Structures are given as C-alpha cells and as structure tokens.
Image (cartoon, grey):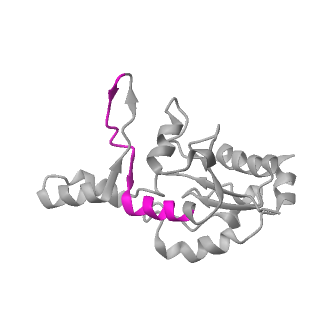
Amino acid sequence: MRQRTLIALDIDSVLNTYDDVLLMANTVDVEVVMKFKKEVKFFLPHDGNKRTRDLGMFVNRRKLALLNSIIDGTDSDIMGISSWFGGGRDDISIATFLGIPLDRFIISEATGGGRSRVRAVAKLIQDDDYDRLLILDDQLEYWSDYGIAVHRAPIYGDVGLTMSIMPDIKRILNTPVDKAKILLQLT
C-alpha cells in the first residue's frame, strides 16, 4: 500500500531570510545589484491588467532550488500554509512560481501562522489519511499541541531552509504520523 506524504509549506523565513532583505536594502552598489539579481526571485502578482512588483514577495533562489529538490525527491502533496496564500491572491500562480506541481498542490484555508495553521495541517492529515508529514515552517508554537512537532524541520527565520538540515528532513520523512495523537486533539 502506497504511503501518502504531506509537505506543509511556509514561505517567509523559510524560502527567504533577513539576509535577503538586507541584500535588497543595499542595492546602490553595482556589485550588490548583480548579486541581488542572482540571489532573489520576485513573485509578480497581477493587479487588474498590469503586473506589479511586490517587494515583500520574493524567495532566495538557492532555498527555492532546495525546496524543489525535496519535492522532486518525494511523491508528496504540498499544502500552502504561508500568508502568501489566501488573502485574495492567486494561489495557483504562487504555486507555479515556486515550481510546485499543480496536481500535488493543496490550498489551505488557514494561512498566516498561529494555531489555526497547525490545526488545518492536523485536520488534513486526519481527513485525507496521510502517513508522513514534513513541516517546513519557522513557526515553533502549537505543533506539539497536535502531536506533530516531531515532523517540523529545524528551520529558523535567520537562516531558513538550508542544506545542513537535509539529514533531519530525511529522518522526518521516514517518521510515521501518530494519527491517534492528532485525533485526540481534534475532538
């Protein structure tokens, strides 16, 4: 029987960091501008008929490539839990921008952090019978309340997703979800 895997994906402080923001703030020097273009990729949301650049919606290209290697290396569904999703934005365009296969992308109704984000992930695991879970989120709170903190990769906002945590990610992907703990919290 095929095991089902879910990746819960946050974006800010996972695929971009404070260092990326600093890089953008110092774009006066030509060398910095060239590095900036190589390091950061902007999402260009649609505003009516014109495209507008939202300087708050960007990812670090290396972190995005690492995310894509994780997605490509698993047969997982990806749930968007970031504040990038929802709020009237086009979630499908954001998933496409990130390179997430649309047939594996799940739109969440609870984005932006907090307990509702965690509950939405726990509920999806229970409702759709996922066996494995990888949480890519810098939020520390509430995951243990639903018995799924062991599935959160050690991601912190100052560094985001890095190659150094790949052994942790592999371990997490091989750890079954304790659905009894989740069910206990959801009832």
Instruction: Looking at the picture, tell me which residue is in the foreground, 158 or 122.
Output: 122
The residue furthest top is 48
Q: Position of residue 45 (x, y in %)?
A: 39, 35
Q: Residue at x 52, y 42 (%)?
A: 83
Quarter of the rendering containing residue 71: bottom right
Quarter containing the N terminus? bottom right
Depicted 60 relative to depicted 169: above or below = above
Number of numbered discs overlaid on the protein picture: 0
Region in magenta: 49-70
> Would residue 50 appear left or right of 160 to someone viewing this image?
left
Q: Residue at x 50, y 60 (%)?
A: 68
Q: Residue at x 19, y 52 (%)?
A: 27
Q: Position of residue 13 (x, y in %)?
A: 46, 56
Q: Residue at x 55, y 35 (%)?
A: 86
Q: Position of residue 128 (x, y in %)?
A: 78, 48
Indicate yes or no whether the magenta region holds residue 118. no
Instruction: Looking at the picture, tell me which residue is in the foreground, 34 or 121.
Output: 34
Quarter of the rendering containing residue 182: bottom right
Q: Position of residue 146 (x, y in %)?
A: 76, 55
